[in-house]
Image (cartoon, rainbow, N blue to C red):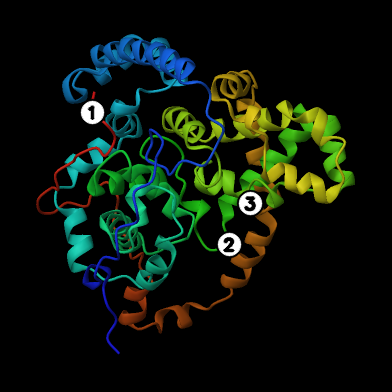
Amino acid sequence: MERKRTDEFEPGPVPPARPVDRFGFVKQEENNPSQGSIKSRFVNEQEREERRIRKWRKMIGVGGSDWKHYVRRKPHVVLRRIRKGIPDCLRGLVWQLISGSRDLLLMNPGVYEQLVIYETSASELDIIRDISRTFPSHVFFQQRHGPGQRSLYNVLKAYSVYDRDVGYVQGMGFLAGLLLLYMSEEDAFWLLVALLKGAVHAPMEGLYLVGLPLVQQYLFQFEQLVREHLPKLGEHFTQEMINPSMYASQWFITVFSYSFPFHLALRIWDVFLYEGVIIVFQVGLALLKYCHDDLIKLPFEKLIHALRNFPEDAMNPDVLLPMAHSIKVSKLLEELKQEYKKKNEKPIQRAESSASKVTQKQLSARSPAFEESTQPAERSWKQTRLLSRNSRKSRSGRC
């Protein structure tokens, strides 16, 4: 039976309208405070947000035209403002500027369109299967085969073709889904490329390669950081046989976008795109530090549950992020990275030694077809160029 493409499916029924929060997620039932306090708080927040927007507009210029100049002149101001949070209506544009994805898009007109329309991917069925699991409570992704799910499918399918070594892994859906809430398909695709291929910071593709090699490295580093910065808790984890793979893998694979409150995830992403993966380590340590006194008393089962369900007061970005920034980890992270590489060199060297025993005669006997099949399927991410560009409209509110 011929396999259907996602754009051949009819959209499902539109879900019934329900109250949503300011980010578009369906609201959970809660006890509402008095209307007077809500109105007063809203007015104060709105005035503060308008002041921030004016500052940011002046800083980035029209369409980001002044951004690079301002970053060179006042890097400390940029860093401080990013850590305070990017205004939501400018978030999509600023994310593209600080990630380097805007430059990639301009260098590669039409590539995204070709990948979506003319190429096929071995991961198409896996992507279709997982789409409904990505931000299921957000109105943009709720309709089965609706506009949101189609856009998510297109971005993930395009990347699985663009980089066949990585292909598609389930956690990538949360990265692409988050980006699609703030920018067009094409913009989201190139930001995904910028992250995984390392346009500004270290490449993330190792998080999704077979065996998740970068996840293993990050978990090793994080475990050592816990022992260094929170020795009593680290010792308690050892006694209860708790290791970071039991609770922290998703932190790295989805950069906190999987199960953390959306307002906190956005603030983390603001910093992540500007400063790199170091913020994931810092936030993880800050969470453990904030809950230290409670965690250290818990036995195994309750400890696992607590590490996967942090209390609401721990999720306040205005408290958690300053605590995270105060934790200095850069030097130790690099030392642990080198230690991890040395620990894993021996198995690699044994494999290379075994492979080197292949004789020259065996190598020369390879057919041209075999040689061609062993070449990397992906194109150089800096050199791909083709046709025209999609329009780019942010799905966040305008300001």
Residue farthest to the left, as pictured: 388
Task: Assign a secondary structure to mark 2.
Answer: loop
Crowding near the residue tagged with mark 2, few <14, some 14–19, many ≥20 C-alpha atoms within 10 Å: few
Q: As shown in the figure, which amino acid type bears the numbered disc 1?
A: Arg
The residue identified by callout 2 is: 211
Rendering quarter of residue 329: top right
- Nearest to the observer: residue 153 or residue 12: 12
Task: Assign a secondary structure to mark 1.
Answer: loop
Report x, y in % for residue 333: 63, 33
Q: Could you tell me how far apart the alpha carbons at marks 2 and 3 are, in whole angstroms?
A: 8 Å
- Nearest to the observer: residue 281 or residue 217: 281
Report x, y in % for residue 278: 55, 32
Q: Which mark's residue is nearer the viewer, 2 or 1?
A: 1
Q: Are marks 2 and 3 in contact (CB under 8 Å)?
A: yes
Crowding near the residue tagged with mark 1, few <14, some 14–19, many ≥20 C-alpha atoms within 10 Å: few
Residue farthest to the right, as pictured: 239
Q: As shown in the figure, which amino acid type bears the numbered disc 2?
A: Gly
**Rendered view: 78 above or below 1:** above
**Rendered view: 130 above or below 398:** below
Q: Are marks 3 and 1 in contact (CB under 8 Å)?
A: no
- Nearest to the observer: residue 366 or residue 251: 251
Rendering quarter of residue 78: top left
Task: Assign a secondary structure to mark 3.
Answer: helix
Q: As shown in the figure, which amino acid type bears the numbered disc 3?
A: Gln
Q: Which mark's residue is nearer the viewer, 3 or 1?
A: 1
Report x, y in % for residue 39: 41, 17
Residue 339 visible to the viewer: no
Which residue occupies 40% across, 80% down? 364
Q: Could you tell me how far apart the alpha carbons at marks 2 and 1 are, in whole angstroms?
A: 42 Å
The residue identified by callout 3 is: 216
